[in-house]
Amino acid sequence: MELFAYLIPYGLEWLNLIVRWLHVITGIAWIGASFYFVWLDNSIRPPAPGSELARKGVSGELWAVHGGGFYNPQKYLVAPAELPKELHWFKWEAYSTWLSGIALLTIAYYFNAQAMMIDKSVADISSLQAVGIGVGTLVAGWTVYDLLCRSPLGKHDLWFGIVVFVLIVAAAYGLTHVLSGRAAYIHVGALIGTIMVGNVLMLIIPGQRKMVEAMSAGRMPDPVHGQKAKQRSVHNNYFTLPVLFIMISNHYAKTYRHDHAWLVLALIMAAGVFIRHFFNLRHKGRVEWRYPAIGVALLAGVAVAIAPARPVAVAPAADPAAEFARVQAIIAHRCATCHAERPTQPGFAAAPLGVMLENAAEIHQNAEKIYKQTVQLKAMPLANLTQMTDAERAQIAAWYEAGAK
């Protein structure tokens, strides 16, 4: 029975690894395709009036060289004269990324909600409530976004973008007040990812199918389908940099552990939008340096604002051995339940990042990491699962700043 209890979290850890790897691979494929086609749309140039391409209905083309060959992509204003025999669809990149992301969310967070999603200093909720909040956010987020797209507001790109951004920030604010910071961030990312894949599944691909069906029936496709698909594709393009940051944010506790984590996330997402807008304009031939300047200024402002403050010092003990004994007791009680060769904390099969803190040698070896994670960032214990107190963090700070002897 003990072996079985050990193998379950170990198996989940391997499943986490494989699914995370798959998620990164498919995410690269999807976002890479998105970036390429937005670049292509912004970079093609109309053919000369009266030219053969213009008569064929080509709205733009470009020449490119890559991999030792020349390419000549062309975009038709509505559709070519006849349907080609082979037509490639870009959809499985999006579907695979979302499916692997939801699987990873389930494995890493929902199967271990008590450790990964709940911070009792934020809200004392059950695992079922935490998972319900997470799933409900994704469903409600897509529904509200899609309704806004179909409303009159959807015809005004700038105001639509502002409203959607404000709603996403509002979701971040709400999530950071009921879930742990790390779980709140990842669910904002999942919300954006769900909107992106919803655009592909519910509008872009169905619209393209209608265009193909019309051509197969010998009719000219209705251009409105292409216009709607293009709008949603542009939305997805502006979502990419924010969602990419959130994918890596779990490595940067200084962002999601901040007292105003929702605002930190809002400013970083805004920086991503401004930087993405710069590249979109640049591909059209307009170089507007004010946009990356705003993005960099926002990131610099966040970096300064969330710099860790020096903790309130505790006078070090006259006897270094007694000082270390107190620190070792804190670590044994608050940290070593996870950071051990055989963790006793449910849901952990191995020490996170391979860091073990079971004896004096291991504690001294990792003194800097302990100080950074428990004192400067307050990122550990994870979601403060073992309830480390501020006084205990100050004790660790005093020990480390006195030389970690």
Image (cartoon, rainbow, N blue to C red):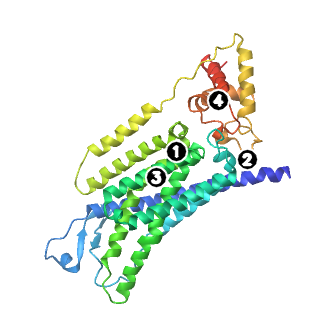
Residue at image x 32%, y 71%? 227
**N-terminal of the two: label 1 or label 2?**
1
Marks 1 and 2, Cα distance to the nearest angstrom? Answer: 23 Å
Q: Position of residue 130 (x, y in %)?
A: 64, 52
Q: Which residue is mark 3?
A: 168
Q: Which residue is mark 2?
A: 349
Whether label 4 touches label 2, CB < 8 Å: no
Q: Which residue is mark 1?
A: 249
Q: Quadrant where the C terminus lies?
A: top right
**N-terminal of the two: label 3 or label 4?**
3
Marks 3, 4: nearer the viewer = 3
Q: Position of residue 343 (x, y in %)?
A: 75, 41
What kind of residue is marked 3? Ile
What kind of residue is marked 4? Asn
Q: Position of residue 100 (x, y in %)?
A: 57, 61
Marks 1, 2: nearer the viewer = 1
Q: Which residue is mark 4?
A: 366
Instruction: Examine the rendered structure and indicate whether residue 153 appears above or below residue 227.
Output: above
Secondary structure at badge 3 equals helix
Q: Position of residue 60 (x, y in %)?
A: 24, 69
Whether label 2 touches label 3, CB < 8 Å: no
